[in-house]
Image (tube, rainbow, N blue to C red):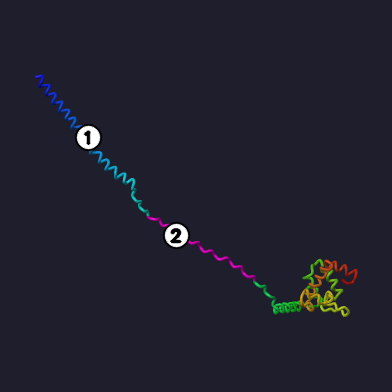
Amino acid sequence: MRSSLLAVMRRRTTLMVASAGLATACAASAVAVALPEENAVAAPVAVAASNPAPAVEQPAVEQPAVQPQAAQAPAATPQAEQPKPQENPAAASRSEQRSELSAATVGTSPGAVKELARSIVPAAQYAAFSNIISHESGWNIKATNAASGAYGLAQALPGSKMASAGSDWRTNPATQIKWALGYMNDRYGSPNAAWAFWLTHHWY
């Protein structure tokens, strides 16, 4: 009986060992089978890493065209200096004619010439101016000194001096009055001063 039990136990042990050996062999086979699969998977990965896929070319972004600068306005051309208008001889002649007409309108009588002088000579100087003209010409615009040739209200010597006041100095009382007033102011400072000189010397 005991021998039978021992024999049974040996068989079970042998089976267990055989089963264990079989399990070990299966496990080893499984490992052997698994390793090639991992290597197979790793290989393409390594290849992929060593040979990267070509980069996909990105479409070029179109840059906006540079806008041309606005054309600069041309610099303003300096205008040529305009020639000064020349005096028209005909206009000057008409001016002289108007002066003569004005003299004719005012009149050349002593009274008319005195009134004209009042409108030209400052009021504070008129009395002295009038005294000088009264003694020199008696308010006659054509008064002439036969000895010296002095002419006009103020007895300008020569009479052509009065041309500085106007070309119509021979006949226009306004021209003669303006010249006489200018002469008294330039030489004596005023008609009053000229009259003071005249009172001392009886000429001026």
Q: Is residue 29 left or right of residue 97?
A: left
Q: Position of residue 3 (x, y in %)?
A: 10, 20
Nearer to me, 27 or 71:
27
| Position of the C terminus by quadrant | bottom right
| Residue type marked 2 | Ala
Residue contact between numbered discs 2 and 1, judged by CB atoms under 8 Å:
no
User: Residue at 44% of width from left, 58% of height from top?
Assistant: 64
How many residues crowd mark 2 within 10 Å: few (<14), some (14–19), many (20+)? few
Give the quarter of the image for residue 33: top left
Q: Quadrant of the N terminus?
A: top left
38 lies left or right of 73: left
Residue at 22% across / 35% down in the picture?
A: 28
Between residue 99 and residue 185, name the one nearer to us: 185
Which stretch is magenta? 59-81
Magenta residue check for 92: no
Residue at 44 percent across and 59 percent down: it is 65
Of the residues shown, which amino acid type is indicated by label 1? Ala
* Other-residue count near label 1 (Cα within 10 Å), few / some / many at <14 / 14–19 / ≥20: few
Q: Nearer the viewer, mark 2 or mark 1?
A: 1
- Nearer the N terminus, badge 2 or badge 1? 1
Viewer-proximal residue, 190 or 111? 190
Q: Based on the picture, tell me whether residue 79 belongs to the magenta stretch.
A: yes
Q: Quadrant of residue 127?
A: bottom right
Q: Position of residue 54 (x, y in %)?
A: 34, 51
> Which of the 4 image quarters holds residue 180?
bottom right
List the residue tagged with mark 1.
28
Q: Which residue is label 2 attached to? A: 65
| Distance of label 2 from label 1 (alpha carbons) | 72 Å
Under tag 1, what secondary structure? helix
Please say if 91 is above or below 187. below
